[in-house]
Amino acid sequence: MINLILSILFSSSLYVFFKYFEKYEVNTLHAIIVNYIVAGTCGFLLYDGDVNFSVIPEQSWFLGAIALGVMFIFIFNLMALTSQKNGLSVASVSGKMSVVIPILFAVFVYKEQLGVLKVIGIVIALLAVYFTSVKEKSTTTPFDKKTLIYPILLFVGSGIIDTFIKYMETNYI
């Protein structure tokens, strides 16, 4: 239970951090790369087993892992941009509701059954992304239609990442 609470806390705070990056003029790409280095170092230092770096590139999952790493950098930058341009709620809903994409992938590729509740859930998720994205920021600053692309890209990109993770897990790990 504690892991679930920590996961929710940290994934939600990510959008807040990205919002503050703009305020404190932190270069998002630099922060993400430093985070990758720190997280990778911590992972290797805290891992109990032996790590043979020379065989890692030969693994069947290696190219997929590289692709996921690149996609994560792109999506984290997009999360930051969406948080800064559209607001925290829009970025959060766009990222979280992207679960629709792996569900659709499972239905079409893995032939899972698509019931009425799943269809209703998918429609509600898509509507949630749309309605949180088009709200007006204030009465003096109207909604800018040009920024609608950020939550849409975040929605699609996060869904693709979740789908690709499941695909890699199913086929390579």
Image: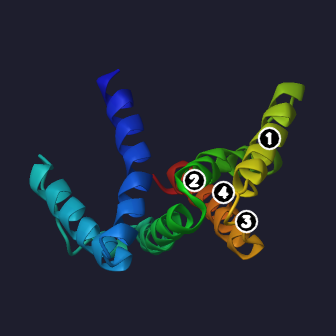
**CA gap, disc 4 to disc 3?**
6 Å
Question: Who is closer to the viewer here, 96 or 3?
Answer: 96
**Could you say which disc has been placed on residue 162 in the image?**
2
Front disc: 4 or 2: 4
The crowd level at tag 1 (other Cα within 10 Å; few <14, some 14-19, many 20+) is: some
Residue occupying the point 11% across, 46% down: 48
Q: Are marks 1 and 3 in contact (CB under 8 Å)?
A: no
Q: Please report whichever mark, 2 or 1, sits nearer to the chain's N-terminal start.
A: 1
Front disc: 3 or 2: 3
The crowd level at tag 3 (other Cα within 10 Å; few <14, some 14-19, many 20+) is: few
Give the amino acid type for the residue marked by disc 4 in the picture.
Ser
The relative height of residue 172 versus residue 71 in the rendered view (above or below) is above
**CA gap, disc 3 to disc 2?**
33 Å
Name the quadrant containing residue 22: bottom left
The residue pinned by badge 4 equals 138
Q: Position of residue 85 (x, y in %)?
A: 57, 68
Question: Who is closer to the viewer here, 40 or 76?
Answer: 76
Front disc: 1 or 4: 4
Q: Are marks 4 and 2 in contact (CB under 8 Å)?
A: no
Q: Position of residue 58 (x, y in %)?
A: 35, 74
The residue pinned by badge 1 equals 122
**CA gap, disc 1 to disc 3?**
29 Å
Question: Who is closer to the viewer here, 81 or 96?
Answer: 81
Tag 1, which secondary structure? helix
Residue occupying the point 36% across, 28% down: 5
How many numbered circles does the render carry?
4
Q: Which corner quadrant holds the N terminus?
A: top left
**Could you say which disc has been placed on residue 142 in the image?**
3
Q: Position of residue 12 (x, y in %)?
A: 43, 44
Q: Is residue 20 left or right of residue 40?
A: right
The relative height of residue 32 versus residue 39 in the rendered view (above or below) is below
Front disc: 1 or 3: 3
